[in-house]
Amino acid sequence: MSSDESKRGITILVTGAGGYIGSHACLALLEAGYNVIALDNMVNCWKDDRLPEPESLIRVQILAGRQLKFYHGELLCKPSLEKIFEDIIQEHKKIDVCMHFAALKAVGESCAKPLEYYKNNITGTMNLIELLEKFGCKSLVYSSSATVYGDPSNLPISESELTGVGLTNPYGKTKYMTEEILKDLCNAVQDWGVISLRYFNPVGAHVSGLIGEDPNGIPNNLVPFVAQVAAGKLPKLKVFGGDYPTKDGTGVRDYIHITDLITGHIKALEFILKDFKGFKAYNLGTGKGFSVLDVIRAFREASGKDIPYEIVDRRPGDIAASYCDASLADRELGWVASRDIHDMCQDVWRWQSRNINGFKKEINPNCILHSPKKLELLLSSLTKTELRKLDRQHHLEILDAIDQQKVQEGFDKLRRLQEVVKASGQLGAADSPAAQDVGLPFCGCER
């Protein structure tokens, strides 16, 4: 049995699957060969009413050439969540590992709405853990945050830095408290295995420009805000604080490309599947700090656009500087970030410039990306029927009994389709040879 075939027997539950990080994780898991169960309450992802799934996950399946199973569910509603678990177990028999991304995540908003953050991030996680245990899954990759370190006493921040001390915002407190709950769980129940990944500012987008960060309303994070200013959607950037003890007075952060971040999750998943038990936390970052003004300069270079800004008062809950020591992840997981700030800005701009309104797009009946009917046809007839048919034929070892040429043509068609969708230079080019070759119409998606 090949490595890819063995992974198709492993089922991963992804919470918050339709969001920025969750959607990129679903794509990587599908491409790696895992079965993916996607769960989201769709508070922070967009869905066309005419389609059964969030737009981000439809595009994920196009890119992967494989399907996932999507459930619209709310972690705070335990009875309905339990029904979803029953359905998952009936269809897939088991959940091997859960990747838990579902959480509210805006630092500033958490200061204004603390009760909402405590309820959603902590109670929701408690409900999830209890049901995972009830249905036989005791392996979790948890989406944590560098905010658990508070205002750090040492830079770069290593995992030996104290957590829970000097926390400056409710969001960070929810991540710290959840980690403490998970630690206590692992100490009390010896067959639980939890890996907590402490993010340092994820940015960037998939290289295809098909999926990226699509915040609701005014962005809370720096890079999406800068991207919308460059695109002309917002008039100027507000830089919160110009008097921090940093090289230029603006806040310094460790920005990590979303693709590198998700690679870290795949490494953590592989580690936990080796029968890891207990609790372990890892930093995921580049180990380099960039100021707000550094990011503005890098984005100007990537986009060729002016980024007007003004420096205003500091934002509640922010700290001066935060960047990590990620050497533990390198030593134990074999993971290291490979993309720099310029890669991040280029990929964000590709996503933003091609998706001015994020996933909320105009409907063009002649475009494979804009037509609900064509998307539905693609997913139901090509991905579901043709790909599963070919997989089944392969697993039953009856390839000799069918027309070999037709099988090869089917695989070649799927590969060419993925190449068309993934090829950043050809996306939206109706007259490209590759697009014509597979017979897929594209409109002017590339704005």
Image: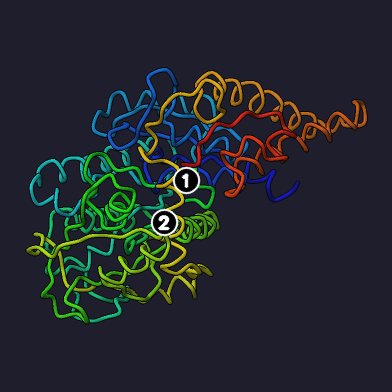
- In the figure, is residue 222 to the left or right of 312? right
Identify the residue shown where x is 45% and y is 29%.
70
Q: CA distance from mark 2 to mark 1?
A: 26 Å
Image colouring:
rainbow
| Percent of width and height locating residue 56 | 44, 36
Is disc 2 placed on a helix, strand or loop? loop
- Residue at numbered disc 1: 97
**Pointer 1 local density, CA inside 10 Å: few below 14, some 14–19, many at least 20:** many
Who is closer to the viewer here, 346 or 168?
346
| Percent of width and height locating residue 148 | 22, 63
Q: Is residue 388 above or below residue 321?
A: above
Q: Mark 1 or mark 2, which is nearer the start of the sequence?
A: 1
Identify the residue shown where x is 12% and y is 67%.
241
Q: Please name which of the two marks, 2 or 1, marks the residue nearer to the observer.
A: 2
The part of the image, by quadrant, that contains residue 389 is top right
Q: Are marks 2 and 1 in contact (CB under 8 Å)?
A: no
- In the figure, is residue 277 to the left or right of 180? right
Who is closer to the viewer here, 438 or 141?
438
| Percent of width and height locating residue 418 | 65, 40
Is disc 1 placed on a helix, strand or loop? strand
Q: Is residue 57 above or below residue 381?
A: below
- Residue at numbered disc 2: 204
Q: Is residue 187 above or below residue 210?
A: below
**Pointer 2 local density, CA inside 10 Å: few below 14, some 14–19, many at least 20:** many
Q: Is residue 15 visible?
A: no
| Percent of width and height locating residue 179 | 27, 57
- In the figure, is residue 338 to the left or right of 109? right
What's the amino acid at mark 2? Answer: Gly
What's the amino acid at mark 1? Answer: Val
Identify the residue shown where x is 30% and y is 49%.
228
Who is closer to the viewer here, 323 or 247?
247
